Amino acid sequence: MNPPTSLKDLERSLYRSSTQDGLIDIQVGSVLLVFAIAPLLSARLGDFWSSAIFLPFWAAVFYAARVFRRSQLQPRIGQIKFGPYRIKRLKNLTSFILVFNLAAFGLGLLAFFGLLEFPGWLPLSILLPAGFCLVGYTLESSRFYLYAIISALTPITGEYLFRNHGFSHHGYPIAFGVLSGTILAWGIILSIRVIRKYPLEDNGGRE
C-alpha cells in the first residue's frame, strides 16, 4: 500500500504536470528562430529591422498559445490554482528573466562600445544555457536542462561550420534552425500527447 500523499507533494506533482503541455517549448522555439532567420535578412533589412520584424510573429505565437490553452487544454485537464509558494516562484521567474535580459543588454552595449571584446559565439553560449537552466529550475522541468546543454553547443557548432565548411552567417541559420526546430517539434509532440490522452468526450457531463 502506497503511503498517503501530502498536499505539498500533490501540488508539486500538479505543478510539474502543468509544464508538460508543450506550449512553453513552442514559444521558446519561436523566439530562437530569430537567430536562424534574422541573419539571412540582415543584408536587406539591416541588423535592427531583421530582428524587429519578429515582434509581431512572437506576439501572434504567444496569443495563439494562450487561445489554445483556453480552448483545447483547459477543457481537458482543467485549470490549476497554486498556493502562495508556487505563485511566488513563478513571479520570481519574471524578475529573473528581467535581470537576465538586462545582463544580456549590458554585455551588448559593452561590446558595441568596444569596452569588452569576446568571440561572437561566447555570449550566446553562456546566456542561453543560463536562461534555460533558470526556466528548468523554476518550472521543475528536467527537459529544459537538456535544452541548456544543446543551446550551449549551438553557437560553437555554428562557428565551426562557418570556419571549416564555409557556411554563411557564422553557421547560425543551420545551427539555430536545428535548435529551434527541435524545441518546436518537441513542444508540438507534447501538445498532441495531451490532446490524445484527454479527449474532450471523456469530460462530457462533468460540470
Image (cartoon, grey):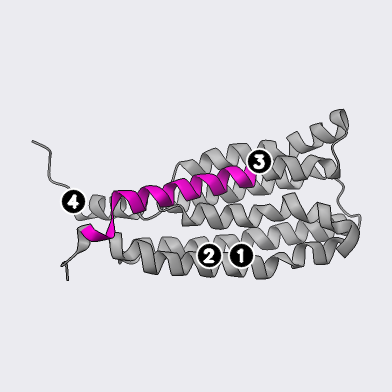
Give the image location of residue 110, x and y in percent. 84, 57
Q: Residue at x 82, y 45 (%)?
A: 120
Q: Nearer the viewer, mark 3 or mark 1?
A: 3
Give the mark nearer the N terminus: 3 vs 4: 4
Q: Nearer the viewer, mark 2 or mark 3?
A: 3
Secondary structure under tag 4 reads: loop
Give the mark nearer the N terminus: 2 vs 4: 4
Reply above or below: 2 against 165.
below
Q: Between residue 177 and residue 93, name the one nearer to us.
A: 177
Secondary structure under tag 3 reads: helix
Q: Is residue 88 magenta?
A: no
In which image quadrant can residue 182 be found? Answer: top right
| Mark 2 and mark 4: Cα distance apart in space | 28 Å
What residue does disc 4 label? 6
Q: Are marks 2 and 1 in contact (CB under 8 Å)?
A: yes
Give the image location of residue 71, x and y in percent. 38, 68
Q: Are marks 1 and 4 in contact (CB under 8 Å)?
A: no
What residue does disc 3 label? 178
Give, as a single range, the part of the protein colored magenta: 179-201
Amino acid bearing label 3:
Val
Amino acid bearing label 1:
Leu
Reply above or below: 162 against 138.
above
Q: Nearer the viewer, mark 3 or mark 4?
A: 3
Amino acid bearing label 4:
Ser
What residue does disc 1 label? 98
Along the horizontal axis of the image, is 30 left or right of 125? left
Give the image location of residue 56, x and y in percent. 66, 70
Q: Residue at x 78, y 56 (%)?
A: 38
Q: Is residue 186 magenta?
A: yes
